[in-house]
Amino acid sequence: MRKSESSGSPKSLLRQQYRRERHDRFMEETWLHILGAREFADVKIVASYYSYGDEPGTSDINQELINRGVTVLLPKLLADNDLEWVRWDGNENSLAANGKVLEPHGFAFTDVDSIDVVIVPALHIDRSGNRLGQGGGSYDRALSKLRCWKIALVHHGELTSDPLPVDEHDQKVNAAATPDLIARFSSL
């Protein structure tokens, strides 16, 4: 949670509610269909994430991208809560635990302008492309540095027409995907 965000703030309360709802209705599903989107047609480098718990699963997406010869980058959390991207070869044994999250080892990928697509987790997305994440701000800071197509993965019922609370630092995404569909946002 951001230092400036209190535990009783509207965003914090929504996070608590959405985490409970996600946990209560969690089902193993796939988001592999996103790789058929036109934005993935000629990608060379994709920044993704290694899902855990009841986050939308990325194992099959990451592996398929690697099978296609695409460079897959995973985030590594730094001491200041910023993210850096590290190339991953698909070997789960090469990941190390950082709390609940498994992260890659290696050197930071610094040519962020060459990233074609970034896949990010979210708790909820609204119809304007506003993303509610876990509250640390790490992804918002990382997304602010990327000029590529940004897609967030959410479960059924987590793409909402209700506006989410937005702070100045929050970064929008270009699209959101459920296991069944991709919603693109024109407001970016």
Image: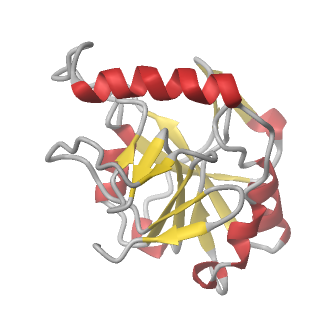
Residue 1 seen in this snapshot: no
Establish if 171 lies above or below 53. Answer: below
- Residue at (48% x, 29% y) in the render: 18
> In this orientation, which residue lies closer to the viewer: 45 or 31?
31
Residue at horizontal 27 percent and vertical 13 percent from the top: 7
Q: Estimate the x, y position of residue 6 in percent, counting from the top left.
A: 20, 16
What residue is drawn where x is 42% and y is 31%?
134
Q: Position of residue 128 (x, y in %)?
A: 32, 62
Q: Position of residue 1 (x, y in %)?
A: 32, 22
Image height of 35 relative to 128, above or below: below
For the view shown, which residue lies furthest in the front direction? 161
Residue 168 visible in the snapshot: yes
Pick the quarter of the image with the C terminus: bottom left
Query: Along the horizontal axis of the image, is 89 left or right of 37?
Result: right
Q: What residue appears at the point 66 percent right and 43 percent down from the top-left corner?
A: 56
Q: Identify the image's colour scheme: rainbow, by chain, secondary structure or one colour.
A: secondary structure
* 169 displayed left or right of 142: left
As displayed, is residue 20 above or below residue 65?
Answer: above
Q: On the image, which quarter does residue 79 sit in?
A: top left
Quarter location, residue 12: top left
The one of 64 and 132 positioned closer to us in this rendering:
132
